[in-house]
Amino acid sequence: MGKPHVLMIPLPAQGHVIPLLELATVLAKHGVQVTFVNLDIIHSRIVDTSSPHIHLVSISDGLESHERLVPGRCIEVWYDSMPQKVEQIIKENSVSEDEKFSCVISDQSLGRIQQVAKKMGIASVAFLPAAAASLVLGFNIPKMIENGIIDGEGTPLKQEIIQFAPTMPNMVSSDFTWVNTRILSRQKAIFNIMMQNDEAIKSADWTICNSIQDLEPGAFSLAPNVVPIGPLLASIEPGNSAGHFLEHDSTCLDWLDHQPVHSVVYAAFGSTTIFSPSQFRELALGLELTGRPFLWVRRSENSTTGVGNQAFPEGFLKRISSRGLITNCAPQQKVLSHPSIACFLSHCGWNSTVESVSNGVPMLCLPYFADQFINRSYITDIWKVGLPFEHDDGGIIGKEEIKNRVDQVLGDHVFKQRALQLQKIIQDSASKGGNSYENLTNFVKWIQG
Ligand code: UDP
C-alpha cells in the first residue's frame, strides 16, 4: 500500500480554512497525501498551499451571490449539499488503490460529512477550530431546553449567566453562539445545525481541537473525548500563509521594525466583523486618542458578504499619518510575534485569541458574534490577560472608553506578566513531552496507520 491519503474539508470561512490547512501542512510533513476541498469561491482565493503533498480541489455550492446575503442561507446549503459532493469525491477516488482515502477530516460544524465517511466505511475525524468550551455549550443544549433557559429554537427564555465548570467562561444566554447572530432565521439555522452536529460527532473516530489542555481544563473535563492538539501554528513554519484569502501586506513588518519595543496597539477584527458607521468612527478616533502608534487592519470589504467598510472621520488619515498604519491584510501571526507589539485590540476569533496568547500579547476585547463572546470571557475573566469594553447607552464603545482601556491594559504590567505565563504554558504543551505535542504525534501515527 502507498502513502495514506486523507480527504480534508473545512467550513468555507477564513477562520476555519487556515487552521485546517495548518493541520494538512503538518500531515504532509509526515508523508501523508492530502486532498483538500474548498468551495470554488474560496479555492480561487487561496494564496499558498505551501506543500506539494497537498492537492487543492474545489466544489460548488450552487449559490448565487445575492443568495449569500440571505442570513442563515449559506450555512444551511453547505450543511445539506457538501456531504453529497464529498461522497462523490470519495467514490471517484475509490477506483484506484493508490487514490483511495484512508480517512476523512472535516470541520466539526459539517457533521454530516462525518456520517458520510462512516457510512462509506472510512475513518472519520471531526476538527474543531474553536475553543472546546463552544462544544460544551452545544452539548448542553438539551439540558438548557429542559431547564427552561432556552426554547426549542434556541431563543433565551431568561437572561442567565452560566458557567458549566470552574475555569470555563461565563456564558450569558443573550450571547450564546447562535443567539448573538442577531437575526432569527440565522439563529434557527445555526441552532439546528449545532444540535445535529452534537449527534454526528458520535460517529467520528477522533474529535481534535485546536486548543490546549491547560488553557481549558474545565471544558476538556466535560468533553473527555475531545483531544487538544493546538496551537497548530506551533507545528508549522512561522508565518506560513497557507489558506489565507488575501495577500499579506508585508510592509507592516518593516514599519513595526521602526517602532519602539512594546509600543504598538495592533487592531484587527478577523474576516467577518462589520462595524456600524458610528462604531467605526469611535474606533478610529479611539485609536487616535491613545496617542500611541497603532497598526489597524481595516478590511476594505467583508470577505463573506463583500460589503464595503466605512469611511474614516474627516482629517483622520492626515492626523495619524506619523504614527498609525492602516492595511487591508497583515501577516497577523508574524505581527503578533513582533517585539514592538504592546497589545491586541481584537474581535476575539479563536485563531486570533490563540495567536495572541501564544505570543504573550495582552488583549482588548471587542467581540462581534458567534463564539467570540465565549473567547472574550476566557481572556478577561479566566486567564485575565485582557479587558472588555463597556458600551454606552446607545450600544456604542466610545473613543474615551477605547483610550482608557488601552491605557489600563498597558499601564498595569500584570496583564503582560499573565500573558507571558500563558505563552510559556502553551509552548510547553506544544514541545516534545507536552500534552498537545504528544496528542498530535499519536494522531499523526494513527493517520499513518
Ligand atoms: N488574519 C491575518 N491577517 C489579517 C487578519 C486576519 O492573517 O489581517 C488571520 C488571523 O491570523 C487568523 C485568521 O485570519 O488566523 C482569522 O481567524 P479568527 O478565528 O481570529 O477570526 P474569523 O476571521 O474567523 O472571525
Image: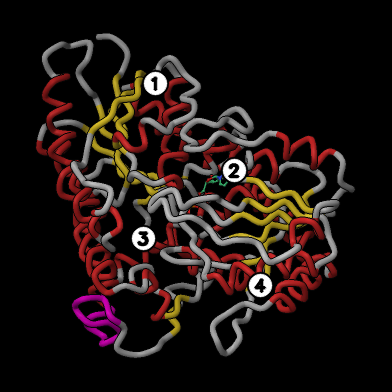
Label 3 lies in ligand 1 vicinity (Cβ under 8 Å): no
Give whichever of discs 2 and 1 has the lower sequence position. Answer: 1
Q: What is the magenta range?
A: 144-155
> In the depicted view, which residue is nearer to us: 415 or 293?
293
Closer to the eye: label 2 or 1: 2
- Residues at discs 2 and 1 in contact (Cβ within 8 Å): no
Residue 279 is one of the magenta-drawn residues:
no
| Amino acid type shown at disc 4 | Glu
Q: Is residue 79 above or below residue 198?
A: above
Q: Position of residue 272 (x, y in %)?
A: 46, 56
Quick one: label 3, few (<14), some, or many (20+) residues within 10 Å?
many
Q: Quadrant of residue 105?
A: top left
Residue in the picture at 64% in, 36% down: 249
Quick one: label 2, few (<14), some, or many (20+) residues within 10 Å?
many
Q: Is residue 106 above or below residue 270?
A: above
| Amino acid type shown at disc 2 | Cys
Disc 4 target residue: 282
Give whichever of discs 2 and 4 has the lower sequence position. Answer: 4
Residue 148 is one of the magenta-drawn residues:
yes
Disc 1 target residue: 54
Q: CA distance from mark 2 to mark 3?
A: 30 Å
- Residues at discs 1 and 4 in contact (Cβ within 8 Å): no
Q: Which mark is residue 329?
A: 2
Residue in the picture at 45% in, 76% down: 171
Q: Position of residue 304 (x, y in %)?
A: 39, 50
Q: Is residue 379 above or below residue 182?
A: above
243 relative position to 394: left or right: left
Q: Which mark is residue 135?
A: 3
| Amino acid type shown at disc 1 | Ile
Q: CA distance from mark 1 to mark 4?
A: 43 Å
The C terminus: image quadrant: top left
